[in-house]
Image (tube, rainbow, N blue to C red):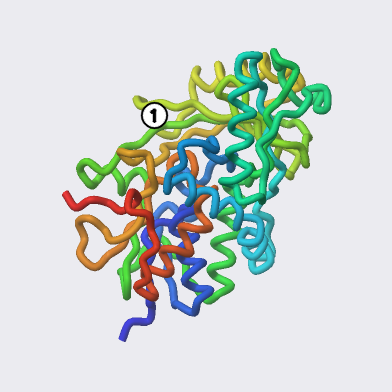
C-alpha cells in the first residue's frame, strides 16, 4: 500500500506550491529534488511580482491577475504555518513615462479600472511625490500600479518547504515515486521534451541599500526590488546562449553599472551577492500545466519563466484541483500538446 498520495519531482516554487496546496487538502505528499529546495531558478534573489500591461486581455493575463490578487493571503498563510518570512509585500510599482507615452498610460489606466476588478489601479502620479526613489522621468510623471508585489525568492521557497513539512509532507533528495506523480523540474525537465521549450539565463545582484517598504521600480528594462530585509535586488539579464549556467560575468557587471546610472541612489551601494540561473521558458511563454505530454497518468507544472512566483499561488490551487479532484480549470493555452 502506498504511503504517499502525491510525489512531486522538483522543489522549486511550482513543485512546492502544488505540494503545499495538496497537503492543505489532506494529501500525503513527498517532494523529491536531488539539489534540494530552490536549487534552480527558484533560488534567485529578485522577486518582482509585476502584472502584464492591462490591455489586449488574454487567459494568461487573467490567470496572473487572479494569482496576484490572492497572493497576499496565500503567502501570509505560508508564513504563519512555517513560522518563516517569505519576503512578500504588495507595495506597488513605479516607472517613468515619456511625454509621448502619457496618453497611452492614461488609456491603460482606464482599461485597468475594469480588468483589475477595482482591486488595484494603474495611474499617473507626479514624479515629485517620489523624489529620491525614482530615476529621471522626462514627462515629470510616473506610472504607478498598486497590483505589483515583491517577494524574496530564496526565503519564499524555504518557507514553502517548511510549510509542507508542517503539514506532514516529506522533502527528500532521493526516493522512488509513489501515488500520483507531478513533474516540476524546471529548465532541465522542460528541455527533455522536444518542442516544449528551452531555458533562458538570468543574472542579478543584491545590494546593501535599505529601502524597505518602498515600491519596486522599473526603468530601462531594469527591475529594482527593495526587499524587506534591507537589501535591494537588481535584475536581470536575458540570455539565450551561455557557457556557464550558474556563473556571473561581464553581463552582470554591465547591469550593475546601468542600475547605478539609472538609479542614482544606488551609486555607492555595496554589492552583497551575485546570482545566475536558468529559467524555464516555454515555446509560447505561457506556463505548462496539466497532464504530462509524454508520461501517461503523470502531471506537469513548468515554464514559470519570469512570472513563476507571481502565478505560483494559483498554479498550486488549480493543480491540486486537477490531481486530487479531477477538476480542470486550467486555461487551454497552458496545457502541453502531446508530441
Q: What x and y, as percent, mark residue 332?
A: 32, 53
Nearest to the observer: residue 147 or residue 274: 147
Q: What x and y, as percent, mark residue 153?
A: 58, 47
Horizontal side of 20 relative to 223 (left or right) equals left
Count of numbered circles in the view:
1
State the quadrant of the N terminus. bottom left
Q: In which quarter of the image is residue 142?
A: top right
Horizontal side of 64 relative to 176 (left or right) equals right
Nearest to the observer: residue 214 or residue 183: 214
Horizontal side of 135 relative to 59 (left or right) equals right
Residue at the disc numbered 1: 244
On the question of residue 172 being in view, the answer is: yes
Bin the neighbour count of mark 1 within 10 Å (Cα to Cα): few under 14, some 14-19, many 20 and up.
few
Q: Residue at x 32, y 45 (%)?
A: 188
On the question of residue 46 being in view, the answer is: no
Q: What x and y, as percent, mark residue 171?
A: 47, 65
Q: What x and y, as percent, mark residue 48?
A: 59, 39
Q: In which quarter of the image is residue 322?
A: bottom left
Q: In this view, does 186 lie above or below 77?
A: above
Q: Residue furthest left?
A: 339
Q: Which residue is drawn at 53% across and 22% down?
A: 252
Nearest to the observer: residue 204 or residue 300: 300
Q: Which residue is drawn at 81% across and 23% down?
A: 132
Amino acid at each position: 500500500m502506498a504511503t504517499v498520495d502525491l510525489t512531486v519531482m522538483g522543489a522549486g516554487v511550482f513543485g512546492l506550491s502544488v505540494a503545499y496546496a495538496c497537503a492543505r487538502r489532506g494529501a500525503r505528499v513527498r517532494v523529491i529534488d536531488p539539489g534540494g529546495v530552490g536549487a534552480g531558478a527558484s533560488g534567485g534573489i529578485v522577486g518582482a511580482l509585476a502584472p502584464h500591461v492591462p490591455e489586449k486581455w488574454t487567459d494568461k493575463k487573467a490567470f496572473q491577475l487572479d494569482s496576484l490578487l490572492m497572493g497576499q493571503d496565500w503567502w501570509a498563510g505560508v508564513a504563519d504555518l512555517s513560522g518563516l518570512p517569505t519576503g512578500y509585500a504588495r507595495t506597488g510599482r513605479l516607472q517613468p513615462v515619456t511625454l509621448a507615452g502619457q496618453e497611452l498610460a492614461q488609456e491603460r489606466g482606464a482599461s485597468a479600472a475594469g480588468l483589475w476588478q477595482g482591486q488595484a489601479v494603474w495611474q499617473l502620479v507626479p514624479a515629485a511625490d517620489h523624489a529620491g526613489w525614482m530615476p529621471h522621468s522626462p514627462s515629470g510623471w510616473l506610472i504607478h500600479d498598486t497590483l505589483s508585489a515583491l517577494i524574496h525568492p530564496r526565503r519564499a521557497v524555504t518557507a514553502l518547504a517548511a510549510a509542507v513539512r508542517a503539514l506532514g509532507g516529506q522533502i527528500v533528495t532521493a526516493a522512488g515515486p509513489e501515488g500520483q506523480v507531478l513533474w516540476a523540474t524546471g529548465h532541465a525537465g522542460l528541455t527533455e521534451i522536444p518542442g516544449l521549450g528551452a531555458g533562458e539565463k538570468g543574472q542579478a545582484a543584491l545590494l546593501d541599500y535599505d529601502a524597505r517598504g518602498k515600491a519596486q521600480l522599473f526603468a530601462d528594462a531594469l527591475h529594482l526590488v527593495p526587499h524587506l530585509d534591507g537589501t535591494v535586488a537588481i535584475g536581470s539579464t536575458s540570455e539565450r546562449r551561455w557557457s556557464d549556467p550558474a556563473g556571473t560575468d561581464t553581463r552582470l557587471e554591465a547591469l550593475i553599472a546601468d542600475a547605478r546610472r539609472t538609479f542614482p541612489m544606488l551609486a555607492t551601494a555595496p554589492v552583497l551577492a551575485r546570482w545566475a540561473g536558468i529559467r524555464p521558458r516555454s515555446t509560447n511563454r505561457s506556463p505548462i500545466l496539466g497532464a504530462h505530454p509524454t508520461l501517461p497518468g503523470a502531471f506537469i507544472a513548468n515554464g514559470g519563466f519570469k512570472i513563476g512566483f507571481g502565478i505560483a499561488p494559483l498554479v498550486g490551487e488549480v493543480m491540486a484541483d486537477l490531481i486530487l479532484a479531477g477538476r480542470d480549470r486550467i486555461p487551454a493555452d497552458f496545457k502541453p500538446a502531446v508530441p
